[in-house]
Image: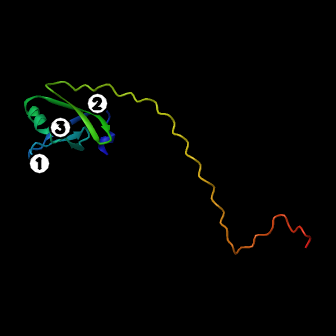
């Protein structure tokens, strides 16, 4: 939920978690509202953690995709720059849905159905 509240360019905080029971290299990602949004991937955490201990670090929220969120990190001072926002082509309106067939009238073989034209033989 917190990820959906972030806009591109919002500052995020990276926190080393050396006491994490699953991964001593874990780095938590926290929003500016103080809510944890997730973790840096396990493949990148050791390298980023080492750089965090050596240099000044700044991170911003970059964007949301179906599988998760992305942050942009800059070491050595200054804020990271975001790439230009992708331009989405205009979407065509959705094709109209086909109409459903009209419901079939229920036919009861034991019901009385009077002749709509009336008796033709004068009875």
The vertical placement of 28 against 109, above or below, is above
Residue at 66% across, 63% down: 105
Provide the secondary structure element on which disc 3 rests: strand
Q: x and y percent of residue 103 in the render?
A: 63, 59
Structural distance between the alpha carbons of marks 3 and 1: 14 Å
* Mark number displayed over residue 20: 1
Q: Nearer the viewer, residue 102 or 27?
A: 102
* Mark number displayed over residue 14: 3
Q: Nearer the viewer, residue 98 or 41?
A: 98
How many neighbours does mark 3 have within 10 angstroms: few (below 14), some (14-19), or many (20 or more)? many
The vertical placement of 58 against 20, above or below, is above
Residue at 23% across, 42% down: 34
Provide the secondary structure element on which disc 2 rests: loop
Chosen colour scheme? rainbow
How many neighbours does mark 1 have within 10 angstroms: few (below 14), some (14-19), or many (20 or more)? few
Q: Residue 28 falls in which quadrant of the image?
A: top left
Residue position marked by numbered label 2 in the rendering: 9
- Say whether marks 3 and 1 touch (CB < 8 Å): no
- Which residue appears farthest toward the front when viewing the image? 121
- Say whether marks 2 and 3 touch (CB < 8 Å): no
Q: Which quarter of the image is occupied by the C terminus? A: bottom right
Structural distance between the alpha carbons of marks 2 and 3: 15 Å
Residue at 15% across, 30% down: 57
């Amino acid at each position: 939920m917190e990820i959906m509240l972030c806009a591109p360019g919002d500052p995020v905080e990276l926190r080393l978690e050396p006491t994490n029971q699953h991964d001593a290299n874990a780095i938590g990602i926290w929003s500016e509202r103080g809510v944890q949004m997730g973790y840096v991937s396990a493949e990148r955490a050791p390298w980023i953690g080492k750089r965090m201990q050596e240099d000044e670090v700044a991170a911003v929220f970059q964007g949301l995709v179906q599988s998760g969120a992305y942050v942009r990190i800059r070491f050595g001072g200054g804020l990271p720059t975001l790439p230009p926002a992708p331009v989405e082509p205009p979407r065509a309106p959705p094709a109209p849905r086909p109409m459903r067939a009209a419901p079939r009238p229920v036919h009861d073989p034991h019901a009385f159905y009077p002749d709509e034209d009336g008796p033709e033989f004068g009875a």
